[in-house]
Image (spheres, rainbow, N blue to C red):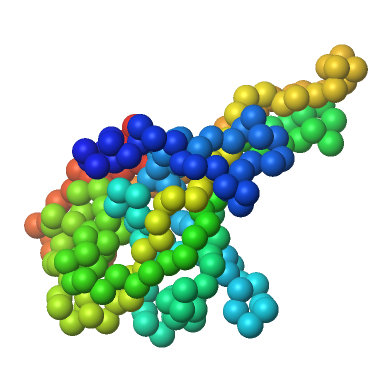
Amino acid sequence: MNEIDQTINQEPLTVTHRSQIKRLPQRGNYEREAIYQILDEGLVCHVGFAVDGQPVVIPTAYGRVGDQLYIHGSPASRMLRSLQNGIEVCVTVTLLDGLVLARSAFHHSMNYRSVVIFGTATTVEDTEQKQEALQAFTEHVVPGRWAEVRLPSRQEIQGTLVLSLPLTEASAKVRSGPPNDDEADYSLPVWAGVIPLQVVTGEAIVDPRLQQEINLPAYVQNYTRSPSR
């Protein structure tokens, strides 16, 4: 976490009528640090918007720099072209931590951490800021990768559309712990508990055209999506 994040994280976000958690409000969290930790651990966000009255939700990768969330892609992308016009957008990120098995079918649930962001995206025109965003995308997926790869050329940067969404109207929602059964159901002879879930990596698959003398980088060998990474 950089110094900018440390300063921003001391102040919770202002709760709005859109970001306020209404269902089970005790699970809500408006602290920047909690929101940023979920965003930094996730890999895919879902971008929701409406075009000509038609709702659309698109999954895509993202990156974060301070209090800005970046998404990018081809200028031909319908999603990016639509968001470029200043329409309202809702972005969500969800981390699934476990399956909660209760004694009754009604109380089955999931342990999760999620973030919902509202706002209007703007186009990043500045070349330096675009490169910073592209670095954020790369480092968000694989920390340490940017320092080794060929950096984007000026033509590649110009051919990439980058949008910035301010993290000013957002909230986190978290469920953790065991099932919450009705008191009368705790005596039922039914197994109850949590099946933990997590993102795990398999053995890296080498590109068949990789030069033989190139060794497996430590950031690949030790890769994890753990929040402590």
Residue 18 vs residue 31: left or right?
right
Closest to the observer, 189 or 4: 4
Percent position of residue 173, x then y? 58, 39
Residue 179 lies, with reference to residue 12, above or below; the image says: above
Percent position of residue 182, x then y? 85, 22
- Which residue of the protein is positioned furthest toward the bottom in this rendering? 76
In this view of the protein, can residue 229 be seen by the observer?
yes
- Quadrant location, the C terminus: top left
Percent position of residue 170, x then y? 51, 48
Residue 196 lies, with reference to residue 38, above or below; the image says: above
Residue 159 lies, with reference to residue 46, above or below; the image says: below
Residue 39 lies, with reference to residue 107, above or below; the image says: below
- Quadrant location, the N terminus: top left
Residue at the (61%, 52%) spot, across then down: 18
Residue at the (62%, 33%) spot, across then down: 27
- Which residue of the protein is positioned furthest toward the left in this rendering? 213
Percent position of residue 99, x then y? 65, 36
In this view of the protein, can residue 46 be seen by the observer?
no
Closest to the observer, 17 or 163: 17
Closest to the observer, 180 or 120: 120
Residue at the (31%, 59%) spot, across then down: 137
Residue 134 vs residue 70: left or right?
left
- Which residue of the protein is positioned furthest toward the top in this rendering? 187
Q: How many marks?
A: 0
For residue 194, what is the image quadrant? top right
Residue at the (29%, 77%) spot, across then down: 160
Residue 218 vs residue 184: left or right?
left
